[in-house]
Amino acid sequence: MKKGKLIVFSAPSGSGKTTIVHHLLKQKELNLAFSISATSRKKRGEEVDGRDYYFISAKKFKKLIKKDKFIESEEVYKDNFYGTLKKEVKRLRKEGKNVIFDIDVIGGLNIKKKFTKKALAIFVQPPSLEEMERRLRNRKTDTEEKIIERVAKAKKELDYAKYFDVVLVNDDLEQAKKEAYQLVLKFISN
Ligand code: 5GP
């Protein structure tokens, strides 16, 4: 069976990338499977272990890094580790699935560097920092301190947009979903 391709969505949090990724996963013809990351951060809201993330302790996370079990991993926020497990991607590609990632900017570029032409790296850009902050507040899942931390990180992340294959501006979610669909369809058809 032909090995699947990799589609990476990276963006500051609050850019709407998770919504876009979930929308694409529903389109069966794209044959996508979500790469479930491991994280040491606490579960939030309705999240489910083994569906949204593999929730593990920081201690276990560090052990897995030592054992070289990750394709990439980052301390995205202080004391909160996130990483893509080699095993996860291998399993999904072997099934012939195209693997879709919802990961941070540095992680996304690391995947692109490793898989080159097999990977499409898409940067989802929020219309403005103010709008992004508004979305984070509306989500009501983060504390004030976390929101401030996320906005500060977003400011730095916007500088990385130029290194991605595509920049998708999300000022109209429905439009962004359509564009994302077309981009993925074209990439997997080649
Ligand atoms: P959240 O805590 O909002 O779920 O995620 C915080 C950030 O970490 C988001 O930008 C998310 O995309 C990113 N992230 C999730 N999984 C991974 C991963 O496996 N590797 C990296 N580098 N970032 C990740």
Image: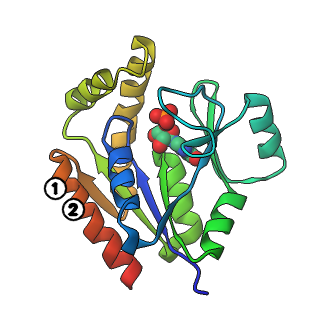
Nearer to us in this view, 24 or 79: 24
Please state which amino acid type lies under the numbered disc 1.
Gln
Q: How is the image coloured?
A: rainbow
Residue 130, horizontal then vertical, whole percent: 21, 26
User: What element does badge 2 sit on?
Assistant: helix
Where is residue 33 drawn, in percent x and y?
Answer: 51, 63
Vertical position of residue 151 compared to residue 66: above or below? above
Residue 1 is labelled as none
The total of numbered circles placed on residues is 2
User: Residue at horizontal 35%, vertical 20%?
Assistant: 140
The percent position of residue 99, horizontal first and vertical second, equals 52, 65
Secondary structure state at the residue bearing disc 1: helix
Q: Circle 1: is it few (<14), some (14-19), or many (20+) Cα within 10 Å?
A: few
Q: Say which residue label 1 marks.
A: 175
Asked if the residues shown at circle 2 and circle 1 are in contact, with their CB atoms under 8 angstroms apart, the answer is yes
Does residue 16 appear to the left or right of 179 in the view shown?
A: right
* Mark 2 residue type: Lys
Q: Is residue 83 left or right of residue 125?
A: right
Decide if residue 37 is on the left or right side of residue 180.
right
Q: Which mark is residue 178?
A: 2
Distance, label 2 to label 1, CA atoms, is: 5 Å
Q: Residue at x 57, y 77 (%)?
A: 96
Other-residue count near label 2 (Cα within 10 Å), few / some / many at <14 / 14–19 / ≥20: few
Looking at the rendering, which quadrant does residue 190 occupy?
Answer: bottom left
Left or right: residue 169 compared with residue 46 = left
**Residue at image x 61%, y 87%?**
1
Camera-side residue: 47 or 165? 47
